[in-house]
Image (spheres, rainbow, N blue to C red):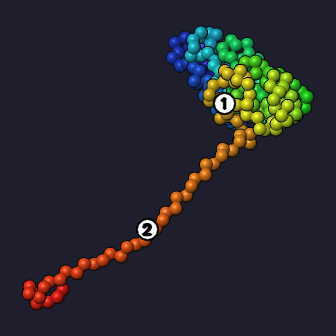
Amino acid sequence: MRMIKSFKSDAFSTIKPDVVTFSSVLNSLAKSKTVPSKANKCLSILKSMTELHKVDRTLDTQPNIICYNTVLNACAFSAHRGDDEKREALSVAVETFNQLREGHYASPDAVSYGNMLKCCANLMPLGNSRTSMASKIFSSCVEDGLVGGMVLDEVRRSMPPDIFLKLLADCGFDKPMRKRKLPSSIELRDLPRKWTMNVKGSDMASRQRASFVKPKKERKTRRRRTERKPTVPVRTRQIVETAWISDKNV
């Protein structure tokens, strides 16, 4: 913040925070386990960045998707300080996500939707409100083709199993419901291709929780039996000198 004040007050200042500076500070706050109201503080920093960009008008200070996702991540992990902080973090998450949907500086990606669904699961009690909000977010994610590994994981965690299967059917994928599949058995490769067509490779199954990933089949390795070859006794040759050379047999 001192860098921002110095840049605004001194016209000849060479110290100017950029997107790397802001994202580093946001990341540190988001990962903190001791800072109170970290979601609100992250949003304040993001707003300061936006105001600075309006003055500066350069790409160096323009908020990117990493900054927005970091704020959403800070909200998702604000669930350990009581109900008041949960409500505050949820409000920050909704405001941040709506800014992303407006698309002034960035647009939501698979991580954005995943973090927003994580906010639903972590900050809201299980019930109709949480199910309704998670369903709307997931439906928008399906329309955008951004259902990645974290999205599938968190929407599954946000609602009861039967409602999750019904949600998939409402979005146009009723095969799991018809075949009475377990929600935990559904993988990204089972979903329609158009649901995942805009997801980056790094945001696919690598972000799924281990509890939902089928264990890989271990290849049976054949143990090679080492057959011991029988040891052949080495025959020692005797050198014999004839008696006419040394008069002795060796």
Residue 202 falls in image quadrant? top right
**2 or 1: tag closer to the N-terminus:** 1
Whole-percent x, y for residue 153 in the image = 75, 34
Towards the viewer: 125 or 7 = 125
Q: Are marks 2 and 1 in contact (CB under 8 Å)?
A: no
The amino acid sitting under disc 1 is: Met
Circle 2 crowding by C-alpha within 10 Å: few under 14, some 14–19, many from 20:
few
Q: Which residue is mark 1?
A: 204
> How many numbered marks are there?
2
Name the image quarter holding the N terminus.
top right
* Residue 104 visible in image: yes
Comparing 202 with 120, the one in front is 202
Q: Is residue 65 above or below residue 249?
A: above
Question: Residue most toward the bottom?
Answer: 247
In this rendering, the answer to whether 185 lies above or below 106 is: below
Q: Residue at x 68, y 11 (%)?
A: 104
Q: Quadrant of the C terminus?
A: bottom left
Q: Nearer the viewer, residue 17 or 237?
A: 237
In percent of the image, x 86 and y 28: which residue is there? Answer: 166
Residue at the location (61% across, 19% down)?
A: 4
Residue 195 in the image, given as x and y percentages of width and height: 73, 23
The residue type indicated by label 2 comes to Lys
User: Disc 2 marks which residue?
Assistant: 229
Label 1 CA crowd tier, 10 Å (few <14, some 14–19, many 20+) = many
Q: Nearer the viewer, mark 2 or mark 1?
A: 2
Q: Residue at x 60, y 14 (%)?
A: 8
Residue 157, image quadrant: top right
Q: Position of residue 147 (x, y in %)?
A: 72, 25
| Alpha carbon separation for disc pair 2 and 1 | 53 Å
